[in-house]
Structures are given as C-alpha cells and as structure tokens.
Amino acid sequence: MGHWGAAVTESWSGGVGDSAGFAAAGAALTSLEAQSAQLSAAVASGGFRIEPEAATDAAKACRDFMSKIDEMLSRTQQVRAVVGFGESWEGGGLKVKFTEKATGRDDSLIPLLRKMQKILSDMAQSYEMAGRAYQDVEDANRQAFSGGI
C-alpha cells in the first residue's frame, strides 16, 4: 500500500495536483488584463471607436461570460469541501491538494476566476464608454451639420 500511495501522491504533485497546474491560466489572465488596460487607455484617449450597438453587444458578451463564471464559482464550493478520499495519509494529502487548488494561493482556481470577472467587468465598462463617446460625436456632428450649433 505504501508504494501505491507514494505513486499516487507523486502523480498528484505535478501540474495537475498542485496550483502550478493553473500557471498557464494565470499567465493568460495577466496578458488579458494588460489588453484590457490598453483598451481602457485607448477609450480614455479617444483612440478607440466603436458603434454603440457593437459596444452594447461586446459589453453584453463580457457580462454573459461573467455570469458563466458565477456558475463556475458556485460549483467550486464542492472543490473546497472535498470528501471521499478517506482518512489515510494519502487521502488527507489529496484533500489538502484539491483544497489548495481551489483556494490556496492567488493563482488557485477561485482567485483566478474572480480576476477574470474583474477583467471582464472592466472591459464591459470600456466598451460602453467607447460606445457612448461614439454616439456623443455622432450627435455633435449631426447637430453641427444641421445648423444646430
């Protein structure tokens, strides 16, 4: 039993078994966060324009994905309360590893999902701001060309 237990513990100590398995997701979120910041800066400087309807659609897509993440987060409660590995030292070790994958560090599942929601929220706001700015320019142009100014 000791040899089998050691093999199981070793197999779970790599990418799948520890939080390092989420390193790629964390790196991808860091990249997406930088892109979101660039989008926000471009919107603030007037360098990004999008038609209001497209902006609304993009913001809605962000918020829809945020809702899916909410569903995922509600299911992660099951990962936090892992049971069924038994009372052996192997079972205890696996329970700790799965719990750490969910909540153990900043690069664990739950913090990464929350970070993704924040990025999506920021992006939705940026799209909405860009759409409003576009509409404001359109309104001003329409008024200027109709002799309203």
Image (tube, rainbow, N blue to C red):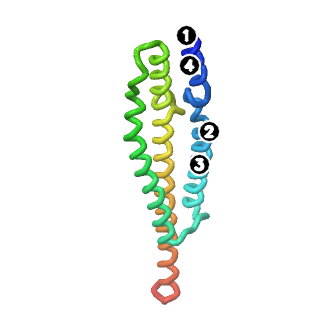
Give residue 32's mark. 3
Please say if the residues under marks 2 and 4 sit with CB atoms less than 8 Å apart: no
- Counting residues from the N terminus, which is met first, the one under dot 3 or under dot 1? 1
Hey, what amino acid is under mark 2? Ala
Residue 72 place in picture, x, y as percent: 42, 43
Q: Nearer the viewer, mark 3 or mark 4?
A: 4
Whether residues under marks 3 and 2 lie with C-beta atoms below 8 angstroms apart, the answer is no
Tell me what residue is drawn at x 46 percent, y 18 percent. Answer: 91
* Mark carried by residue 135: none
According to the picture, the residue beneath numbered tag 4 turns out to be: 9
Query: Mark on residue 2?
Result: 1
What amino acid does circle 3 point to? Leu
Q: Nearer the viewer, residue 68 or 57?
A: 68
Spatial distance from mark 3 to mark 1, Cα to Cα?
44 Å
Looking at the image, tell me whether mark 3 or mark 2 is earlier in sequence order: 2
Residue name at image x 51 percent, y 84 percent: 144
Discs 3, 4 touching: Cβ within 8 Å: no
Residue 34 location (% of width, % of height): 60, 47
Q: Residue at x 55, y 29 (%)?
A: 19
